[in-house]
Image (cartoon, rainbow, N blue to C red):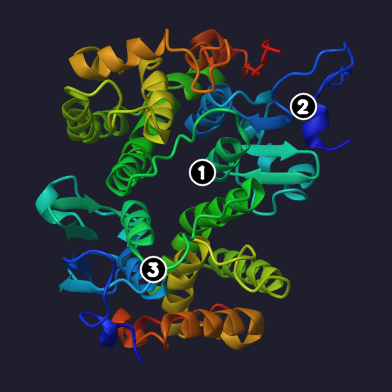
Amino acid sequence: MDIFDKQAPMGKEEYGSSGDMKKTQYMLQLLGTPWDANTLKCIIAAAEQGMEVHSGYLDVLNNEQDTESYRSIFEFGTYPGLKEADYNVAGATGILAFINARGLGFSLAPKNVTEAATQDFWVDVAVTEATPYINTLVQEQVIKPMVDSSYSQDKNAIDKARSNLEPILNMLDKQLTGNPYIIGKYTFSDVHWTALIHLLLLTDSRDLVEHRTQINRWYNSLAVRKSNCGQDIVSFSLLPTIEDIKNKKLSSVIINDF
Amino acid sequence: MGIFSIFGRKKDKSSQEIELLGITGHIATLKCLILASIKDVSLQTRLASYNVGVDQINSYQYLDSSNRVPTINHEGFTVSGTPAILTYLDIRGKGVSLTPRKARVLGQQNYWIDLCYEILGPVTQAVTTGTASDDDKKRLNKILTSLNNLLSENLYVVGPMTFADPHVAAYIYALGCSGVDMTVYPKIGDWITRLENDMGGPLKIEYLHMDPSKLTATN
């Protein structure tokens, strides 16, 4: 039994044991944390593409990613980690690409050259520009106070993160003007930004989102959007609440359509 | 034939040449140049002066459109940042796409791209600026050993040539320029040779303009 089977067990049921076969053929196991945007992106993508995922908590607060049981699978300790039978891959970009290729829905990566490049630009902005500042806010305003009730927030770090996020969010708000999704159609760029904006809304800095009309409109539309694969599931509904984070609870993706 | 000698000569699918604005010594820019060479894309390059830190190797630096690098302009379309530019050049370029069709290979391709950003990039930065700690050197040796082992089984980083190759190769060139002894990783050297054959010749590594006085060995 490896760390996946220990912390994200598949359950005893097997596909077809009840006489019905689901459309999805693969069972995935995911290890991550509910406050990690990269983990949430994987859950969103799995729901969008109709892939069942059994999720488990990776205790990064106690450096579980550096333990032998995890490093024997992922030698550099990167996470989230995904397992499918005899295959393992770590990191959001690897997992997202794998799920997208395995899944049931239309590809989340556009084929048109300018759409594909524009999508990658917005993913790049999310990953390299927005993520470090949102991580700072999540750590300072949610995780550190959760771990230590006497923790005193680093105001300078918070102010800097907020200040640096302003122009990035302005750019996103402008991009969403006239577009239902970030580049027009639903793509990986929406997956990346959904996770980030959701986490930002769980912090005390949620006002950064709330006063931006277009981001709000786009985010609220995702709350009722059916999955890309046509299965009866809304990926947004799997995102964690603040209570889920405190309870270190990650949603699994269960497909009930047969 | 060096990478710069091909610019302006080869033709891509479209009529108008693609313009690339990059920075000398900038690994993100180097990745674009390597991929353009692999995909035989003609680029009109404008390399800005080396006026940003090497620590910004993976970022396009600024949100202000006038300062983003690398940036490409082509037939009225402008986009910035390595991932977007590599995607654009791959689709515009000759031959089959570098995007693998098999899900597992796709996952491994992106796993190595992630490792570039999370591990190889930071330790390369430390080495090229002469600030590498013992821990940095150990991490560098670990990832180069892992890559060397992988390349003893694969022709390219994850099997077929993919986006992982230009990503990883850019750091290998930078490390080579910084005096890291790559002969202890012979499979990496063999892979670079294969890549250069695919590109039509070796890179002119002086492009990186590293300061020899700041070099440090990593092994």
The image quadrant where one finds the N terminus of chain A is top right
User: Is the residue under label 3 in contact with that under label 1 (CB below 8 Å)?
Assistant: no
SS of the residue at dot 1? helix
The residue where tag 3 is placed is B94
SS of the residue at dot 3? loop
Residue A242 to residue B188: above or below: above
Tell me the crowding category of disc 3: few under 14, some 14 to 19, or many 20 or more residues within 10 angstroms, Cα based: some
Horizontally, is B86 left or right of B9 in the view? right
Horizontally, is A166 left or right of A252 in the view? left
The residue where tag 2 is placed is A7
Tell me the crowding category of disc 2: few under 14, some 14 to 19, or many 20 or more residues within 10 angstroms, Cα based: some
Tell me the crowding category of disc 1: few under 14, some 14 to 19, or many 20 or more residues within 10 angstroms, Cα based: many
Q: Residue at x 67, y 32 (%)?
A: A31
Q: Residue at x 68, y 23 (%)?
A: A52
Horizontally, is A49 left or right of A112 in the view? right
Instruction: Farthest residue to the left: give it.
Output: B66
Earlier sequence position, callout 1 versus callout 2: 2
Distance, label 3 to label 2, CA atoms, is 46 Å
Amino acid type indicated by mark 1: Thr
Residue B116 in sight here? yes
Amino acid type indicated by mark 2: Gln
Q: Residue at x 18, y 66 (%)?
A: B15
Q: Quadrant of residue A127?
A: top left
Q: Which mark is residue A10?
A: none
Distance, label 1 to label 2, CA atoms, is 22 Å
Foreground label between 1 and 3: 3
SS of the residue at dot 2? helix
Distance, label 1 to label 3, CA atoms, is 25 Å
User: Is the residue under label 2 in contact with that under label 1 (CB below 8 Å)?
Assistant: no
Q: Which mark is residue A93?
A: 1
